[in-house]
Amino acid sequence: MSVDPPRRKPPRRLVALASLLAIALVACFGCDTRRAPAPSAIATEPSAKPAPPPDVALIVAYGSEKKTWMEEEARAFEESSPKTASGRRIRIQAKAMGSGESVQAIVDGSLKPHVFSPASSAYVALLNDRFSAKAQRAKPLAPAGDVVVLSPVVIAMWKPMAEALGWPQKAIGWSDLLKVSADPKGWGARGFPEWGRMKLGHTSPEFSNSGFLAVLAEAYAGAKKTRGLTAQDLDAAGTRAFLAQVEGTVVYYGKSTGFFSEKMIERGPTFLSAAVLYENLVIESYAAKTPPAQPLVAVYPREGTFWSDHPYSILDADWVGDDERQAADAFLAFLKARPQQERALALGFRPGDASIAIAKPIDAAHGADPKQPQTLLETPEVATLEKLLATWRQVKKGADVVVAFDKSGSMRGKPLEEAKRGAKAFIASLGDADEASLVFFDGTVYPAVGPKRLDAAARAELAQRIDGVAASGGTALYDAIASGYALLQDRARRDPARTHAIVVMTDGNDEGSKIALGDLKARFPKDDAVIKVFTIAYGDAANPKALDEVAEAARGSHMKGSVENIGQIYADMAAFF
């Protein structure tokens, strides 16, 4: 059996100490413990971790044509948990914008990006010129930057139409489009009368790179040069006549290259015969959710074209600090790494990394030719680029626009005041050779003010009429559109060379119109809408579905606006003209 070991008695000194402690505790019983916290209360708390440093938000203003790639890579970059040397985590705020739109916003101070990545280095030169002039600084705001991807500017055509011009055996150029346009028979001269007339689309060169380079390529073709275009070349009668002829085939303009690509695929050959796009957008069309009835092909104009070289320029600005610069450098290195470059190739771009071979989908099966372009044009000096825009404004197709303005009772207060401001800015942005009419409506459609050729006196009068309007009554929306359409019909017959359009803004549903929505849409020709209708749904009470249906039926465009952005919506509408 087991035996417990004998217990040892505690030493006498410990017994005495324990007795003294017991006496002390008894003496303290009932004392004010607030002055002497219990031992547990004075125990040392674990030291709190220091707060992490704030994230670095890297603002990247980039050309919208690379949106898919840029958004994918921005998210992948963030998932790698990148940090600056100071330990700040990097976040990407990518803003997809037209290249010209970005330049305007940076110059006027409404946009302060850390990185500027337009579609073309031509816009880097324009930004530096305009920012230096405004800020009175000699040092460029935007360095030349690194090329991240490439895509040639092309004329996207329906394959049967390109074949009717001799493609692919024959190199096609701007002059071939002009021959079809100038012939009274249109495509009938090529044996296809059912195709109607030649209809070209490109973006506004004041907002978008593809439109800017399209007009520059037209000017080179008109001057019969491939290098060294000058201001004197742009003043030459032959160059101006050629520009005017090509621009005369344009259905209308716009801010977004993607818009023309999407609408071309959605609406088919009756909408556009050809559009100036990027090669990657032609390739993308083969993966569209609803493939077009006919395939698109990329035509590389025989007179020459440009690379859209997508520079990545870290701005030398006072709002770009050390951490932002480090973040920008890190993101650039990520974009130039091989996996990201190979992903760009899969999306139809040509990699900025020359070591990566051009392969599928840049091939004939996707409407592209990896051996093109054969003839590249030179970007001229910035003074010539500015002159080009001024020349385009003078020779471009004129516009005849009816502005239908909702003054119904629901517009009272700030909605009416902001809509007035936007409408006046819209009219102010139209060219001196353009014409405009005002049609006010509430429950009644009032007689038109105009048409008026937009000289200084006419602009002032129209602005005054807009300022003087007051809100009341219902919303005879469909009758207002029908009235504007009737107003333009005779003028469109007499002057088919102009763009004829209605821009209608409303904040509500139709109320009490004599014409129904279906009957209104039936008035617009299905194959060739000579009069386009552009609609703005203003506020939450508007009916965007009905307005979108009207815009689609009349081959225009639809936008949604609010009190906060109606001015910008009107500005976006102005880009179509």
Image (cartoon, rainbow, N blue to C red):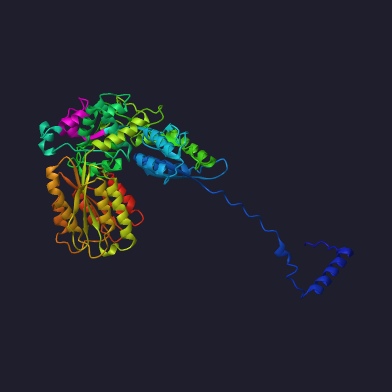
Residue 170 forms part of the magenta stretch? yes
Residue 198 in view, yes or no: yes
Instruction: Residue 344 in the image: state x and y as whole percent.
Output: 37, 36
Residue 68 in view, yes or no: no
- What is the total number of numbered labels drawn onto the structure image? 0
Q: Residue furthest bottom?
A: 30
Instruction: Residue 177 in the image: state x and y as whole percent.
Output: 19, 31
Where 139 sits versus 512, above or below? Answer: above
Left or right relative to 446: residue 352: right
Q: Quadrant of residue 394?
A: top left
Q: Quadrant of residue 508?
A: bottom left
Q: Please identify the quadrant where the C terminus is shown.
A: top left
Instruction: Residue 551 in the image: state x and y as whole percent.
Output: 22, 50
- Camera-side residue: 471 or 342? 471
At 19% across and 51% down in the image, what residue appears?
450
Residue 22 forms part of the magenta stretch? no
Left or right relative to 553: residue 373: right
Q: Give the extent of the magenta segment.
A: 155-181
Q: Residue furthest front?
A: 457
Instruction: Residue 386 in the image: state x and y as whole percent.
Output: 34, 34
Q: Please identify the quadrant where the N terminus is shown.
A: bottom right
